[in-house]
Image: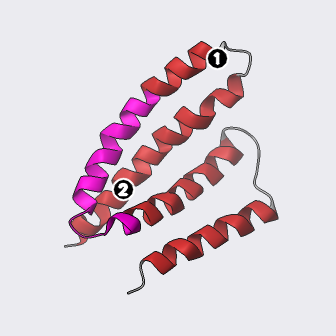
């Protein structure tokens, strides 16, 4: 069923939005104390885990663990590319895109039989 195949993808997408804010969102507020950045990141990461764990549980019925990880890496790169440009104001350069493309190729290889 299409829902079974796509639900993990959408959950991974949502979890990666939270993860990206948890890991990199504080870079916009470098004057804030490091302890605040850590506490805020941990709080945001809780929501990431609330989506990531079900994504992997559900996804493991159809995908292998390496396939789930490859999928997650590609989603992470796509979310990060948008986040870096939109939120941090740091658009990616050609070499970043080239490196990301190589990772996408690696993830594609994971799905081959």
Q: Position of residue 104 (x, y in %)?
A: 57, 71
Residue at 52 percent across and 62 percent down: it is 74
Tell me which numbered mark, 1 or 2, is placed earlier along the sequence: 2
Is 55 in the magenta? yes
Is 70 in the magenta? no
Q: Position of residue 11 (x, y in %)?
A: 34, 51
Residue named by callout 2: 10
Work out which residue is located at the far bottom of the displayed protein and give it: 113
Main secondary-structure element of the magenta-colored stretch = helix
Quadrant housing the N terminus: bottom left
Residue named by callout 1: 34
Residue 97 image-quadrant placement = bottom right
Q: Which residues are magenta?
A: 44-67
Residue at 62 percent across and 36 percent down: it is 24
- Position of 51 relative to 6 (above/below): above
Residue at 66 percent across and 38 percent down: it is 87
Q: Nearer the viewer, residue 10 or 31?
A: 31
Residue at 25 percent across and 62 percent down: it is 60
Q: Which label belongs to residue 46?
A: none
Tell whether 90 sits left or right of 19.
Answer: right
Residue 68 image-quadrant placement = bottom left
Q: Position of residue 63 (x, y in %)?
A: 30, 69
Tell whether 99 sits left or right of 16.
Answer: right
- Position of 94 relative to 113 (above/below): above
Q: CA distance from mark 1 to mark 2?
A: 32 Å
> For the residue labelled by badge 2, is the local secondary structure a helix, a strand or a loop?
helix
Quadrant housing the C terminus: bottom left
> For the residue labelled by badge 1, is the local secondary structure a helix, a strand or a loop?
helix
Graded by Cα atoms within 10 Å as few (under 14), some (14 to 19) or many (20 or more), the crowding at tag 1 reads few
Q: Position of residue 27 (x, y in %)?
A: 69, 30
């Amino acid at each position: 069923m299409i829902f079974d195949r796509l639900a993990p993808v959408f959950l991974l997408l949502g979890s990666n939005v939270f993860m990206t804010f948890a890991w990199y969102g504080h870079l916009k507020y470098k004057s804030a104390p490091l302890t605040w950045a850590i506490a805020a990141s941990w709080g945001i990461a809780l929501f990431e885990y609330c989506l990531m764990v079900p994504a992997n549980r559900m996804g493991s019925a159809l995908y292998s663990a390496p396939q789930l990880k490859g999928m997650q890496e590609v989603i992470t790169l796509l979310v990060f590319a948008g986040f870096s440009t939109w939120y941090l104001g740091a658009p990616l350069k050609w070499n970043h895109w080239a490196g990301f493309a190589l990772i996408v190729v690696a993830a594609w290889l994971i799905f081959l039989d």
